[in-house]
Image (cartoon, rainbow, N blue to C red):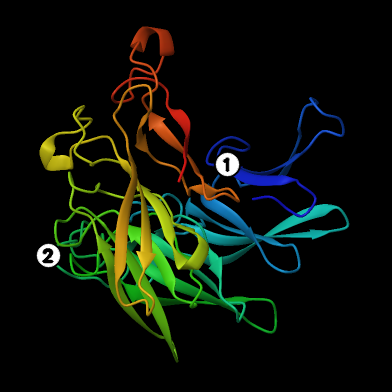
Amino acid sequence: MFDASGNLYGTTPDGGNGCGIVYELSPPATAGGAWAETILHKFDSNGNDGCSPSGRLIFDQAGDLYGGTYVGGGGVNKILFCSNGCGTTYKLHLADGKWTESVLHRFTGEGTDGVNPSGSLAFDVAGNLWGATAVGGAGDSSTCGDPNGGTGIFFCGTVFELSPNADGSWTESTLYSFKDASTGWNPYSGVIVDQAGNLVGTTENGGSALDGTVFQITPKGNGKVEERLIHQFVGEADGAFPQSGLTLGVAGTLYGTAYVGGGTAFTCFKKDAGGGCGIVFKLTPSSDGSTWTETILYTFLGGSDGAIPLDDRLALDASGNVFGLASSGGDFDFKKTGCPGNLPGGCGVAFEVQQ
């Protein structure tokens, strides 16, 4: 995330005290110079304030930074997917040249509370924060059932809201629990707010072919929301298992990736796992928003063009060209690249798709 002065902010899931950091990169004063790094926060070595930050940071209007950690927060150790806690949302406040962290919410997985906040947070016009947890919630079904033998923690995932209070604290509410194929499940990418004020995101699983979905959640007031699927992936035809977030384009279009599928000649995964090496897609709404049309902008072949796109979000330039990262491909020489664990070979690529 850039600020108005051109400084760049981000996170690492490890390092620092062992649980990751929040950093700032300041551009050089002269062309060709090195960027200067400043560590704004090191998460506690035990993860008491969160551990393994995930997703992009966002700013509020006052210049404070907000994000989430996948685990940590303290107090929960016996639940699957949790390590000294089930994750946090946090705020970094700048005063007198020093950044101070405060934890907004510690996820426990108890009741309807989610587990493992993943992807980016988003503000609505009223100043509330929205996000998603990859698992947890109240989605009790045979599709994404209880992996803890009756403890009530489910695989499905949630969408949550954080509302600010007058005393500076925040109140968290689980507004939606994913439950089965009809809703999608495992939203790893967080949410963004579209032009109409709806929340949109992706689920890795679910839909008619169980290959993942793009969902839309409409706030209805009084803590009520309505969910619908605006796209359901069908494996080899149009990609499968999206884990990346969405990017909002002009006229309400949405851009994203699916990390396998596409039905290319080079199969990165077996046919029953989606086949193909991933796609870049665009979703275009109808004039009334009732229907959406998918356009596949690019299908990865798994060679020098890359494979398995796993970026947090795509980026768009002023001309509408699409930029992102693929986690594999680029070079088939395993010995040369030193990335033997990647399929189909190579250490990944940075790509541009021109529209």
Residue 122 shown left or right of residue 42 in the figure: left
Q: Residue 142, labelled with which disc?
A: 2
Residue placed at 42% from the left, 49% from the top? 83
Counting the numbered discs, the total is: 2
Secondary-structure class at tag 1: loop
Residue 78: x and y in percent read: 34, 54
For disc 1, the neighbor class at 10 Å (few under 14, some 14 to 19, many from 20) is: many
Q: Mark 1 and mark 2: span between their CA atoms?
A: 35 Å
Q: In this view, does 242 lie above or below 341?
A: below
Residue placed at 45% from the left, 92% from the top? 222
- Name the residue tied to disc 1: 20
Residue 154: x and y in percent read: 25, 63
Is any part of residue 41 visible from this angle?
no
In the figure, residue 124 lies in which quadrant?
A: bottom right
Q: In this view, does 28 lie above or below 89?
A: above
178, 195: nearer the viewer: 195
Instruction: Please identify the residue farthest to the top as the structure is shown.
Output: 335
Secondary-structure class at tag 2: loop
What amino acid type is highlighted by mark number 2? Answer: Ser
Residue 312: x and y in percent read: 47, 47
Residue 333 shown left or right of residue 121 in the figure: left
What amino acid type is highlighted by mark number 1? Answer: Gly
124, 130: nearer the viewer: 124
In the figure, residue 86 lies in which quadrant?
A: bottom left
Residue placed at 86% from the left, 53% from the top? 97
Is any part of residue 236 visible from this angle?
yes
Residue 334: x and y in percent read: 34, 12
The answer to whether the residue labelled 1 contacts the one labelled 2, judged by CB atoms less than 8 Å apart, is no
Residue 168 shown left or right of residue 299 in the figure: right
Residue placed at 40% from the left, 41% from the top? 310
Q: Is residue 345 above or below residue 70?
A: above
185, 268: nearer the viewer: 268
